[in-house]
Amino acid sequence: MQISRFCRLAAAAAGLLLAAACVGPPPPPPPPMNCCEVPWNYAEQADWATLSPCYFDCGWNREKPPGGEQSPIDFVNPRQQSLPAVDFSAYGKVPGLKSRNDGHTVRIDLPKGAASLRLDGMTYELLQFHFHQPSEHKIRGNARAMEIHFVNASEGGRVVAVGVFIKNGTSNAELAKIWKDLPKKKGDVVDVGEINLGALLPPRDRTSFRYAGSLTNPPCNQGFQWIFYHDAIDLSADDVQKFAAIFPGPDGNSRRVQPLNGRVVLTDVPRP
Ligand SMILES: [Zn+2]
């Protein structure tokens, strides 16, 4: 909010200076700029932090100061320990959903109160979920076909991001509701009907990796608690390709892995 106001003031001041320096009628004032909406893309992801003061957090990876906690990461040498289970009993069937192409992903926003998870005695409401191709997180250097991010927030604004890998496999009945008509252009909105959120989680193995990270795209806000499941759900290779065609380019819509900067990743995945 403060950064946004700073940007508008800076834009207004620049307009005044320009007007004073020029002869003749002053140019029309520039439109108000929200610096958290400066365009960005995956091809130039190394430059995100330089595009806008709002995207400052994206640059923690570069200077590597203490406190840089960017996502995604490669799960290489996690610390083994038992972890509290997440209660997904309120990840049920939600009717009347729509998918939307926001220019960077296909995203499904949830109505208020439609779904939530419980962890360590706290409730986190599911705000939205969306897809990345190829997967952003890796296990010992290996990416998977795609990943889903479920963004959940507590009333106090604490965020739990749940990640689920998608691997090439059989077709997926739940994802088929979204894939039957993917929103192909930025701004497209498509009715998807009812989604059973629980069917988008790994069915059996709920062992996971947990770490402190960030949003994986601008503004790259930190302070996210990440829970990433080891097991993947299936999607046919054809369907993965349909998504890839919407977000072309060598990186697809995927951010490269970020340095750990001393963070510890916890896991209850049995050692291979
Ligand atoms: Zn994401």
Image (tube, rainbow, N blue to C red):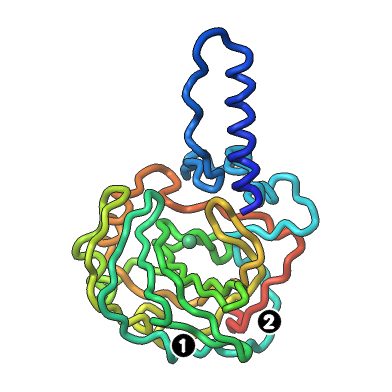
Mark 2 nearby-residue class (10 Å; few <14, some 14–19, many ≥20): some
What amino acid does circle 1 point to? Phe
Q: Position of residue 121 (x, y in %)?
A: 61, 91
Work out which residue is located at the far left of the displayed protein and give it.
180
Of residues 263 and 18, the one nearer the viewer is 18
Q: How far is the residue under mark 1 from the one under mark 2? A: 23 Å
Of residues 85 and 24, the one nearer the viewer is 24
Nearest-to-viewer mark from 1 and 2 = 1
Give the answer, above or below, for where 217 lies relative to 149: above
Give the secondary structure at mark 1: loop
Give the answer, above or below, for where 28 lies relative to 264: above
Q: Name the residue under label 2.
A: 80
Q: Residue at x 25, y 75 (%)?
A: 96
Mark 1 nearby-residue class (10 Å; few <14, some 14–19, many ≥20): some
Q: In the drawing, what numbered circle is on residue 88?
A: 1
Q: Position of residue 99 (x, y in %)?
A: 30, 64
The answer to whether mark 1 is within 8 Å of ligand 1 is: no
Q: Which residue is drawn at 73% across and 66% down?
A: 263
Give the answer, above or below, for where 125 lies relative to 109: below
Give the secondary structure at mark 2: strand
